[in-house]
Amino acid sequence: MDKPAYRPETLALHAGWRADPTTGAVAPPIYQTTSYQFQDAAHAARLFALEELGNIYTRIGNPTTAILEERIAALEGGAAALAVASGQAASAYAIQNLARAGDNIVSGTDLYGGTWNLFANTMRDMGIEVRFVDPADPQAFVAATDDRTRAWYVETLPNPKLVVCPIAELAAAGRPLGIPLIVDNTAAPLIARPLDHGAAIVVYSTTKYIGGHGTSIGGVIVDGGTFDWEAFPERQPLLNTPDPSYHGAVWSQAAKPLGPIAYILRARTILLRDLGAALSPFNAFQILQGLETLPLRMPRHCENAAAVVRFLSGRAGVTRIIHPSQQSGEARARADRYLTGGQGGLLGFELAGGVEAGRRFIDALRLFYHVANIGDARSLAIHPASTTHSQLSPEQQAATGVSPGYVRLSIGLEHIDDILADLDQALLAAG
Ligand code: PLP
């Protein structure tokens, strides 16, 4: 499908698939198969030699999953995508595809807790150092960079702070050094477009808004196709030196006949082959089903969240509201620049009554679910100080943006009057 010809609403329904050639089935079929019959010996040899892309084994690729990959790449304006078993796998592979033991990456401090753990502990145990800096300060990224730095990593709209990072400035500072910017855009699909601002790679937890219905864990890595890996042979050795695990392939060269997809080709061919976090075809189907209505859902999430912000403003017992619309200065300017499709479905607020008020509020909710998730069609709430952040000291909680009375809301698609009525009665109960 010709990417520029269609708008997001159309791509979400059509990119990557047009009726099954054998049966005429319109909905993407679930190809629940592990392996694929080769046409003949020569065909098999061509596939293994990467002279032709095709199905070999579902750990490395699957036709249902391929529709999801093509659709997300089209929506994101990227060259190609790789779907994996979770958002965590997407973040890990995005780094491991460039960095190995002895290398490092520089990351913004404002991260999903699971990513923080991955970077601060598991990556370190693998020999990959992650250097944490202020995500709003491109010069801090430059200062933390040395010869072994392979990538920079940020989240577009990290919670709980919900402060947008300067994507274009970071991308522009990294490119001349041969350093790609990897952006986790999980909280802002469609409403922010990191590749348009120079990011090289985008990762998603499709578990959240993209799947949208809280049924299926998944992740995806999108290769923008615009980063010149070949121009930086010393900075990016994994893409520019012979790979002994694939008969000496040099990925920046091997990918050339297939398009500007060296990065994602290596991730599929090496990381999925060896580490194996493949998405199941059933989950790919579920996520595709969600993706079809994402362009309808995201604006409603944003509208409902904005209405909740208005409702909470000036409300007794609510001392602070955390949402891009409440920011000022550079943070606000970045929100206006990058969140072009709405300001997101997440918000936080602080209760004057601290931890106890937070607990009472959560226990009084009737419509909102109390879960450690975001981006569901249903409204969700959590009180981080007594749950996700309870193992941190008060100082550490403060550093991550969590105060004792902080409540995080992921606003869903219910009627706004019902959302507000539930919040109203829970706030009264919180006291
Ligand atoms: N990135 C962000 C911003 C997230 O919020 C999450 C999960 O909450 C992840 C990554 C990890 O995704 P998953 O739970 O699909 O592994």
Image (tube, rainbow, N blue to C red):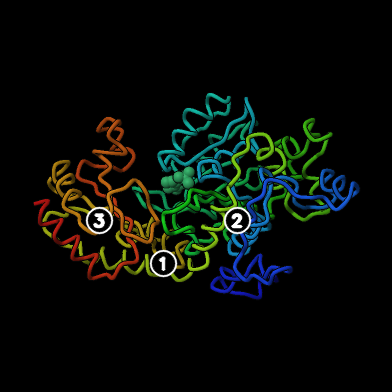
For residue 321, the mark is: 3
Residue type at mark 3 is Ile
Q: Amino acid at mark 2?
A: Gly
Q: Place residue 195 in its image quadrant.
A: bottom right
Nearest to viewer (mark 2 / mark 1): 1
Marks 2 and 3 sit apart, C-alpha to C-alpha, by 31 Å
Q: Which numbered disc, 3 or 1, marks the residue that appears first in the sequence?
A: 3
Quick check: 67 above or below 59? below
Disc 3/disc 1 C-alpha distance (Å)? 17 Å
Q: Residue 137 bears which disc, if any?
A: none
Q: Residue at x 65, y 55 (%)?
A: 31
Q: Is residue 89 above or below residue 310?
A: above
Q: Secondary structure at mark 3?
A: strand
Element assignment for label 1: loop
Query: Mark 1 is on which residue type?
Result: Gly
Q: Residue at x 24, y 53 (%)?
A: 349
Rendered location of residue 73, percent (x, y):
62, 59
Q: Is label 2 or label 3 in front?
A: 3
Residue at the location (69% across, 55% down)? 226
Q: Where is 42 relative to 2, above or below?
A: above
Residue in front for this viewpoint, 198 or 45 = 45
Q: Earlier in the sequence, mark 2 or mark 1?
A: 2
Q: Does label 2 or label 3 sit earlier along the sequence?
A: 2
